[in-house]
C-alpha cells in the first residue's frame, strides 16, 4: 500500500489548480498523490485527515500572517479561501503529527502558524540580502545546510545549489522550529522541527529533478511510519 500524500491546491475562482510537477514527484518517490482541494467546512477537513499519511503545502502567493513590512507590488496576498483551507488542513496535520513538507509559501505558512515572522520583501528589507527571485534576475544560489539537521541527513551534504523563486523570507522562526539551511547572504532557506516530521524549504525541489528525490523519499518513509502508527496524536515537537 502506497503512503497517501495530500497536496494542497490553489484557488483561482471557478478553477482550482495544482502544478503537475508536485504530483509526478510524489509518485516518482513512491507515494500516492492525493490532491487536496480548497475546502470550506471543518467537516470536510476532518473527513479528509484519515486518508492522509503525509502532506505537502506547495508554493503560492504572499503570506500576510506574521508579516514584517509589506508585500511587494508584484506579489498578491493569498486568497482568503485558500488560506483558511490550508490553515485548517496544515494545523490539523501538525497536531496529529502527520509528516509535513512545506515548499516556499508552504514553509512560510508553517512558520506563521507557529508564531514566526516573515519579511514581506526580504531583498528590500535586509541590506545584505541578494535577489532571490527570477522576477529580479536571480536564477539559482547556493545554500549551506546545518550539519546536524535532518535536512543534512536527507541530502547527505552541507551545501547545495537551489533555484530562486521567492520575494518573501522567514525573519524569525516560529515555536519549535529551527533553521536548517541559509543562503550565502544569510537568508533562511529551510526550517524543521526536532523530530523531522515538519520540514520546510524556501526553494522549489519539485523543479530540481532527481537531485531532490531524497527529500520526497524521506517524506514517503515518514508517511509510511505514520501509517503504521495511526493513533499517534498530540502537537508536533
Image: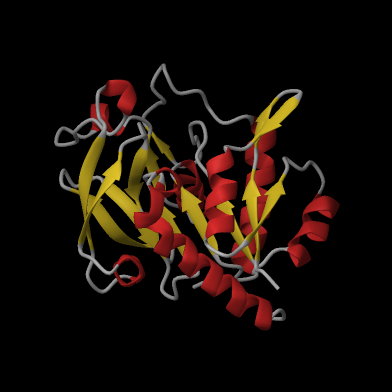
Residue 18 position, x and y percent, is: 62, 37
Residue at the (38%, 32%) spot, across then down: 120
Frontmost residue, 65 versus 19: 19
Frontmost residue, 37 versus 21: 21
**98, above or below 72, in the image:** below
Residue at the (77%, 54%) spot, across then down: 45
Residue 32 position by quadrant? bottom right
**88, above or below 198, in the image:** above
Residue at the (51%, 66%) spot, across then down: 219
Whether residue 38 is visible: yes
Residue 122 position by quadrant? top left
Frontmost residue, 217 versus 67: 217
Q: Is residue 237 left or right of residue 6?
A: left
The quadrant of the picture occupied by the N terminus is bottom right
Q: Is residue 14 left or right of residue 181?
A: right
Q: Is residue 39 left or right of residue 60?
A: right
Residue at the (25%, 23%) spot, across then down: 137
Amino acid at each position: 500500500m502506497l503512503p497517501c500524500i495530500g497536496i494542497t491546491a490553489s484557488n483561482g475562482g471557478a478553477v482550482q489548480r495544482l502544478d503537475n510537477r508536485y504530483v509526478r514527484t510524489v509518485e516518482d518517490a513512491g507515494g500516492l498523490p492525493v490532491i487536496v482541494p480548497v475546502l470550506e467546512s471543518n467537516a470536510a477537513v476532518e473527513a479528509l485527515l484519515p486518508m492522509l499519511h503525509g502532506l505537502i503545502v506547495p508554493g503560492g502567493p504572499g503570506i500576510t500572517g506574521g508579516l514584517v513590512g509589506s508585500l511587494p507590488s508584484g506579489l498578491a496576498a493569498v486568497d482568503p479561501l485558500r488560506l483558511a483551507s490550508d490553515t485548517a488542513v496544515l494545523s490539523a496535520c501538525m497536531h496529529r503529527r502527520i509528516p509535513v513538507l512545506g515548499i516556499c509559501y508552504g514553509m512560510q505558512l508553517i512558520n506563521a502558524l507557529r508564531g514566526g515572522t516573515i519579511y514581506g520583501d526580504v531583498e528590500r528589507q535586509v541590506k545584505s540580502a541578494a535577489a532571490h527571485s527570477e522576477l529580479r534576475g536571480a536564477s539559482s544560489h547556493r545554500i549551506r545546510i546545518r550539519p546536524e539537521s535532518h535536512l543534512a541527513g536527507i541530502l547527505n551534504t552541507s551545501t547545495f545549489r537551489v533555484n530562486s523563486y521567492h520575494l518573501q523570507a522567514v525573519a524569525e522562526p516560529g515555536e519549535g522550529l529551527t533553521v536548517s539551511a541559509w543562503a550565502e547572504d544569510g537568508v533562511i532557506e529551510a526550517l524543521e522541527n526536532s523530530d523531522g516530521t515538519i520540514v520546510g524549504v524556501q526553494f522549489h525541489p519539485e523543479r530540481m529533478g532527481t537531485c531532490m528525490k531524497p527529500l520526497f523519499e524521506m517524506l514517503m518513509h515518514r508517511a509510511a511510519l505514520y501509517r503504521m502508527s495511526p493513533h499517534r496524536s498530540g502537537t508536533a515537537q
